[in-house]
Image: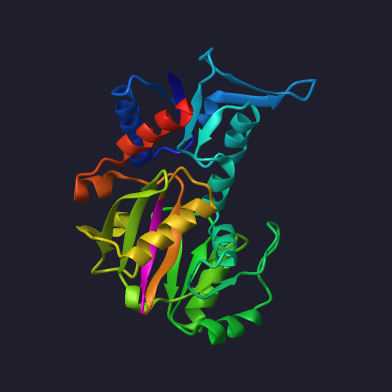
Amino acid sequence: MTGWIIYNGNLKSDKIYELVLWLQKTAHTYDINLIPVKNSDILFYFDEQSNPKLEHLTLKELPEFVISWDKDIPLAKHFELMNIKVYNNSNGIHACDNKVIMTQYLASKDIRVPKTIIAPMVYSNSTIEEFSIYDKIIETLSLPLIIKEAYGSFGAQVYKVDTKEALLEQVKAIGNKPHLFQEYIKNSHGRDIRLNIVNGKVITSMMRVSETDFRANITSGAKAVLYTPTDAEKELALKCTKLLKLDFSGVDLLFGEDGPILCEINGNPHFKSIFECTGIDVSKYIIEYILEDLSC
């Protein structure tokens, strides 16, 4: 069996490529030829009969399945139009990639999220000149509050602001990029939970703890510790994953004063830190699930 694992050819990230090679190595132990493929080496198009077509610059045979370890949503959708199974599906990737869409959709399905206000849209050729709404945002959420850009990874596009001046400065810096404002969950300052889900099951989990930052990202210096999730935490993570129809996910939860709150859900979750913490290799479960799914 041959599959492709797609990664971004224009994003030079050792962290991402390490996981691509990790999945390839795991797949090999199951006699799967999983080929790392740059999205920038693929030409996908519609021919004169409006049929979806796809060509690789050098590879001649198309894959039997695809693992999309990238956020190239149109490419993932094109594979689906050609009846090539994609893990995860393009709609799930889209929702996970955009924190505004993710929060709006999951909150509408009774998933508990921090109190959230979505920022007014700003056109790409415009600047923010109307600031009257921000007093109401502060009144509604109170200070400090959290600002999240819609697109971002490793917590780099998440900001905590303590004053109106800091909020306005950060909004100006973000400019026309979509973003949202959220209530600051004080009880979860510097700590959260990561649960890895595969095929509707919680595979492993950890708590991330930072002594220096309100965020609990490993990249920002947080430490991973063993953690056994509660039934409520598992139920919330599984429900989010099911709603987005994800084959596998990494769900981040916050510690609310009266129960877990969704922080975000990742469609191509990094699993190195959780392996180092727990000794559980999530890639093994992903590959075993793909084999099972394709055999059905």
Q: Magenta span covers which residues?
A: 250-257
User: Residue 45: horizontal and vertical position, in percent?
Assistant: 69, 26
Is 256 in the magenta?
yes
Q: Position of residue 11 (x, y in %)?
A: 45, 38
Camera sees residue 216: no
Q: How is the image coloured?
A: rainbow
Is 262 above or below relative to 98? below
Check the image and name the residue furthest to the bottom.
139
Left or right side of 192 for 279: left
The quarter of the displayed image where residue 48 is located: top right
Residue 190 magenta: no
Q: Position of residue 249 (x, y in %)?
A: 42, 48
**Residue drawn 55% across the image and 84% down it:** 140
Q: Main secondary structure of the magenta part?
A: strand
The relative height of residue 189 versus residue 58 in the rendered view (above or below) is below
Q: What residue appears at the point 37 percent right and 49 percent down from the top-left corner? A: 201
Residue drawn at point x = 49 percent, y = 46 percent? 246
**Furthest residue toward right:** 49
Looking at the image, the residue that sits furthest to the top is: 60
- Measured from the top left, where is residue 176 in percent x and y? 63, 61
Q: Is residue 254 above or below residue 246?
A: below
